[in-house]
Image (cartoon, grey):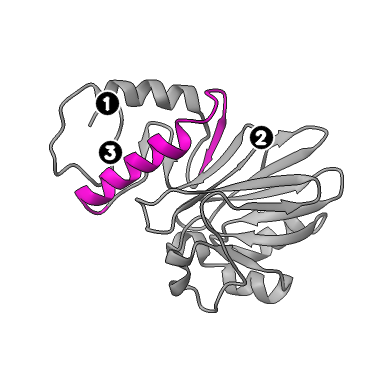
Amino acid sequence: MALIVKNDCIQIEKLKLGPFNTNSYIVTCRLTGDSVLVDAPAEADKILKHLKATNPIYILITHNHMDHISALSKLKSKLRIPIAIHPLDARSLSSPPEVLLGDGDNLSFGKINLKVLHTPGHTMGSLCFLTGGYLISGDTIFPGGPGQTRSPAGFRQIIESINSKIFVLPEDTQVYPGHGNSTILKNEKEAFGIFSSRPHDPDLCGDVLWLSS
């Protein structure tokens, strides 16, 4: 577990879980103790242990790939709290979610408000969650590039999502992705500027890096 944000109002912890080292985040209101869990990759018991000191309100899912939801059934049975996901990614869950999220929706817990950003490309229902200067980005954007895409159309879609939903945020926004380390939005905008200034194969997709693709 890594404590990545802590101030008078909010605490964000990162757990790196499962065979794909997927990041799960616990966002806690420090004024009330209410919390949300973002993604349920694996090792449910470890997640439950770290949630113990809080009052969990929601389980939020950034997208429906198995490395982000493998612990979901066990966590749901133990916590008995609503699962929230975009409808386009909801069908693969073992049971219907209680909350369907759309672009621009707001979720409140304690004194914290999370804004929902729909960022399709990695999956059709990919979501990011924004509060203040902190963005939990799932597999939409990472340090050095976008999330993996399976087709040129998917790549164009994820770039549109990043440009229209993420790069419009303040440059000092801290970005916490679904795998690996965090980044600062300013760094990604600068690297993308270099990427977009160069010609690219129209069939570009897959694992793309801003500076070497």
Circles 1 and 3: CB distance less than 8 Å? no
Image quadrant occupied by the N terminus: top right
- Considering depth in this image, is 38 or 85 the residue closer to the camera? 85
Circles 1 and 2: CB distance less than 8 Å? no
Q: Which amino acid does label 3 sit on?
A: Val
Q: What residue type is labelled 2?
A: Gly
- The residue at 32%/48% (across/down) is 148
- The residue at 34%/50% (across/down) is 121
Residue 206: percent from the left, percent from the top?
25, 47
Of the numbered discs 1 and 3, the one sitting upstream in the chain is 1
Residue 171 seen: yes
Specify whether 202 is left or right of 136. Answer: left
Query: Which quadrant of the view contains residue 195?
Result: top left
Mark 3 element type: loop
- Residue wearing tag 3: 208
The magenta stretch is: 150-177
Residue 205 vertical placement versus 197 (above, below): below
Q: Which amino acid does label 1 sit on?
A: Phe
- The residue at 42%/65% (across/down) is 88
Residue 104: percent from the left, percent from the top?
55, 49
36 falls in the magenta region: no
Q: Which of marks 3 and 2 is in front?
A: 2
Mark 2 element type: loop
Of the numbered discs 1 and 2, the one sitting upstream in the chain is 2
Mark 1 element type: helix
- Residue wearing tag 1: 195
- Residue wearing tag 2: 132
